[in-house]
Image (cartoon, rainbow, N blue to C red):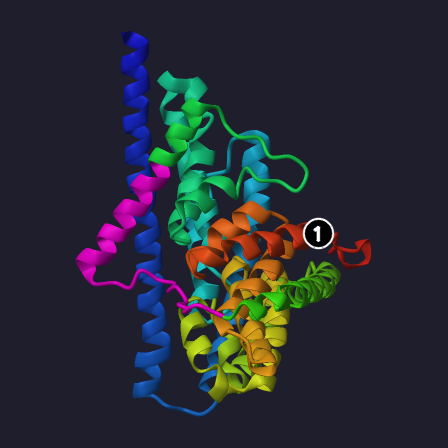
Amino acid sequence: MKGLKNNLLFVLYTAILGAIVGVIVWSFLKIMNYGIDFLWIYLPSKAGFPLYTLCLCTAGGLLVGLWKKKTGDYPQELRVVIGRVRKTGRYPYKNVFTIIISALIPLLIGASIGPEAGLTGIIAGLCTWVGDKLKRYKKETDELTAIGMSATLGTVFRSPMFGFIEPIESENDTILPKTSKIVLYLTAILSSLGIFLLLNRLTGTSSGIEGMKSEGIPWEHYLYAVPLALIGILAGYLFFAFKKLTSLTANRLKQFVIVRGLCCGLLLGLSGTFLPLTMFSGEHLIVIVSEQAQTIGTVMLLITAVVKLLLTNICIDWGLKGGPIFPVIFCGVCIGCALSILWGIDPVFSCALVTTALMGHTLKKPLATVLLLMIIFPIRFVPVMLFAAAAACLIPTPKLLKPEIG
């Protein structure tokens, strides 16, 4: 009975932990959105001076460089956070407030990144701190950091199963937790997402990314599945080629933190001035772009996708750090829309195939990729999306394109 009581109590603690994660994620995104509205809507309306985007981004890049020079290179990339937690079960929590500021500034100035990297590092650190306090459950608390990390991903992307699968799926091996641990993971994820959605409803806040709708399509459109997937994989090659370039230059300029931040902000400002769609994560623009694809035009869609793939890597490697997932999804949608115009096929089907192949190739996690993209694309496309994700993962990334991490 004592063991059962302890187990039930720990499940309750896990549910509370998940709820706290949901509140933190909601609060972080709320502050981010308020800051973006202030910097990009309120201020320009009150002081509409020329080259506002260029000036704000450059100043923001300089601020990031100065901040990193003082505090360190935070936040870490998502793959680094996940790798560290998988290896040690822990994540440092003494610099949590530094990570919060470091994650917020690039998002506020419009960097082509998502919030998942910073949020995951914040929650992982806090969960490690909680685990250290709950000494009574020392054996179980080793899992708290990983559980909190999964809850964060499931909430940020509004996909519980993606949050569960993404951290444990690997290119080389995927090990499912024991049944008892699965209960804890899902309890925390559902608790976190539930609180997040409740707070959104209570405050009238948008839930974030919207799904793309498609009516039935002619069977012959499925004949384009292979070429669409191949183009998505080629876009993945392009992503890694850019990653190789930006990581090499970042390593060469490793000691010049302020210069890297300043140059990154300048490039972001120039890109945003001439190609506004390349800024921010792109999460809220996916449906808008798909609906206005004809107006935007094929050439502009392709240019936007290519520039954004490059800009995302520049931001991550040169100092404006964050996550690449939302920007990469946005790029896949841009390419898919362009191809749908060229080939006269259903735009949602085209976007689903290209985006899945692109994401599958960059993540190297086919199941997580499909679980994530199911929140955007219709369920009936899942079979062909699984094909695209599997093909993208089976085709290796050439060693020449693998970036140097330093």
Give the image location of residue 109, x and y in percent: 45, 71
| Nearer to me, 382 or 139 | 382
Q: Residue at x 55, y 43 (%)?
A: 81
Nearest the camera: 155 or 336? 336
Left or right side of 159 for 360: right
Residue at disc 1, secondary structure: loop
Is residue 249 in sight in this rendering? yes
Where is residue 78? Give x, y as percent.
55, 49
User: Which class describes the residues within 10 Å of circle 1: few (<14), some (14-19), or many (20+)?
Assistant: few
- Quarter in which the N terminus is drawn: top left
Q: Is residue 218 left or right of residue 37?
A: right
Q: Which residues are magenta?
A: 188-217
Nearer-the-camera pick, 155 or 266:
155
Rendering coords of residue 316 (x, y %): 59, 61
> In the current view of this chain or complex, which residue is farthest to the right?
400
Above or below, comparing residue 265 to residue 195 in the picture? below
Q: Is residue 322 visible?
A: no
Q: Is residue 215 magenta?
A: yes
Q: How many marks?
A: 1
Q: Which kind of residue does numbered mark 1 sit on?
A: Ile
Query: Which residue is at 56% across, 57% downward?
Result: 384
The correct choice, above or below, for 300 with respect to 250 in the image is below
Please state the horizontal and vertical placement of residue 339, each as a whole percent of the image: 60, 77
**In this view, 17 is above or below 279:** above
Q: Is residue 46 above or below residue 218?
A: below
Q: Which residue is mark 1?
A: 405
Closest to the observer, 102 or 390: 390
- Residue at position x 57%, y 51% in the image: 386
Quadrant hosting residue 241: bottom right
